[in-house]
Amino acid sequence: MREDASAMIDAEERRDLARKVLGAAPLRVGSLLVVRGLAAVRVVVFARLFLPSEIGTAALALTCVGALGVLANFGFLPSVIRRRQGSPEFDDTAFTLSLIAAVLVFAAALAGAPLISRIMSADLDAYIRFAAFLVFAVPLSFPRVFWEKQLDFNHPSVARAIPELASFAGAVALELLFHLGVWSLVLAQAGGALLAALYVWWLAPRRPRLALERRDARELLGFGTPLMLQSANGWVMARGDNLLVAFFAGATQLAYYNFAWQLPMTISALAASVDSMLFPVFARLNESRTDVSRLFNLASKMWAICGSFFGFAMIVFADAIVLVLYGPSWAPAVPILRLMSVSFVIRFCSGYAYDNLVLVRGRTRYMMKWGFANTLLVMTLGLYMIREGGAIGGAWFWILQASLFTPLLRLPLIHQELGSFEFVGHVWPALVAGGLAALCAHEVRLALPADAAALATSALVYATAYAGVLLLLDRRFVADTRRLIAGARS
């Protein structure tokens, strides 16, 4: 990155970038709220429509296909976005390579279905072979890259919401009309992916063609292969613990484990969606370390406030959250939720947007190496902790993982790219505010009887204490918030 004035993005362009991102944020967040709200409804509805064995079989088949599908995701979309001087030939090559990867993975899924069934001790062949068509969702969603490169995030937001909405409605309709059981769930998932693909190809500003330029292919594979391997590592980190919990502790503990993660996952998905909107902006500002640092500091503050407020709230009110959302029978999920919330706070308050720095600089090999280290950690220490402690052991592992990789991975990378830890000054007020507010709310809950009025009072104390401490420690919070609101309105 160069610091000379010629490399600086002019003020008008920065304002234009801010307007586009902030203008798209309401629809992106709104669509995610709808999808995650629907996910909560889905849990209740599916529990009444399908047998647990049907839900488990469909989930297992789709999870196995999802694991294979990771191999078809070579990160070609970020490759196209980060390339400032794009060309139709480069874009067409990226699409063609994505399609070739999907065909190879599809063939592997068809051939490997019997082996997967034997390993999982379940009759999954037919479901896996049909669900294998879902690997084509990656190349079929490719045209949305042209929207995102132009900082048009509205259409991609709709495209991401369509599969969730369609798969839920389709599964309910198929089961009510035809009573297909597992097939209702699998067919609906495929139908949702197809509708999303039709939307993208119908409205995208450009439709890629089949073409293969050797020089472009080398560049794409050089950037994308480490990213694909990192995605595989990420899948192990995100799903590997589920398989371990199911294997060592059984389906009931897995249910507690998954339900405890529902709320943190919803907030994380919202944050990841908004954070992904920042990547094209980081790519535009990549030539100026000063501009990148400013954006990273602002993003770090935003995610620290989000993570500390919701994370500490989940720690204090975990019992009430589980009781209201899931009912008394899910009480064993309370300690799991509390532990998972601790790891949630650590991740959000330690430079959550660091992955944007990696992608804009093309340092995918660096992430790939750390991804392998993370996978090794899951399959060794994570396996041991889950084997010994079940779902609780898995929750403790998430805290350990976040505590290890923050000082070993995130902080060194941030310092290498930005030259300082300036972002810490933007993060600590939110962290302190969350901790003090949680302490106040906890003391109120201890002092009052366990009823709805006491819960409402402690929640009010928490929100008031958080806002008061944050405003006291971060004098720029009000000004930054006004600037963001003004940018969104404009």
Image (spheres, grey):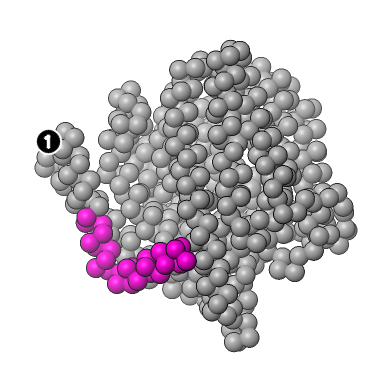
According to the picture, the residue beneath numbered tag 1 turns out to be 449
The residue most toward the front is 490
Which residues make up the magenta segment? 464-490
Taking the image as drawn, is residue 473 in sight?
A: yes
Residue in the image at 35% along x and 49% along y: 310
Q: Give the tally of numbered discs.
A: 1
Does residue 454 appear left or right of residue 301 in this picture?
Answer: left
Locate residue 371, reporting x and y percent: 60, 51
Give yes or no for residue 434 being in the magenta stretch.
no
5 up-or-down from 26: above or below: below
Give yes or no for residue 468 being in the magenta stretch.
yes
Q: Nearer the viewer, residue 366 or 373?
A: 366
Locate residue 191, reporting x and y percent: 66, 30
The quadrant of the rendering that contains the N terminus is bottom right
The residue most toward the bottom is 5
The local crowd at label 1, few if under 14, some if 14 to 19, many if 20 or more residues have their Cα within 10 Å, is few
Assign a secondary structure to mark 1: loop
Q: Nearer the viewer, residue 427 or 365?
A: 427
Q: Nearer the viewer, residue 143 or 368?
A: 143
The amino acid pointed to by label 1 is: Pro
Taking the image as drawn, is residue 59 in sight?
A: no
Does residue 355 appear left or right of residue 198 in this picture?
Answer: left
Residue in the image at 76% along x and 37% along y: 105
417 up-or-down from 386: above or below: below
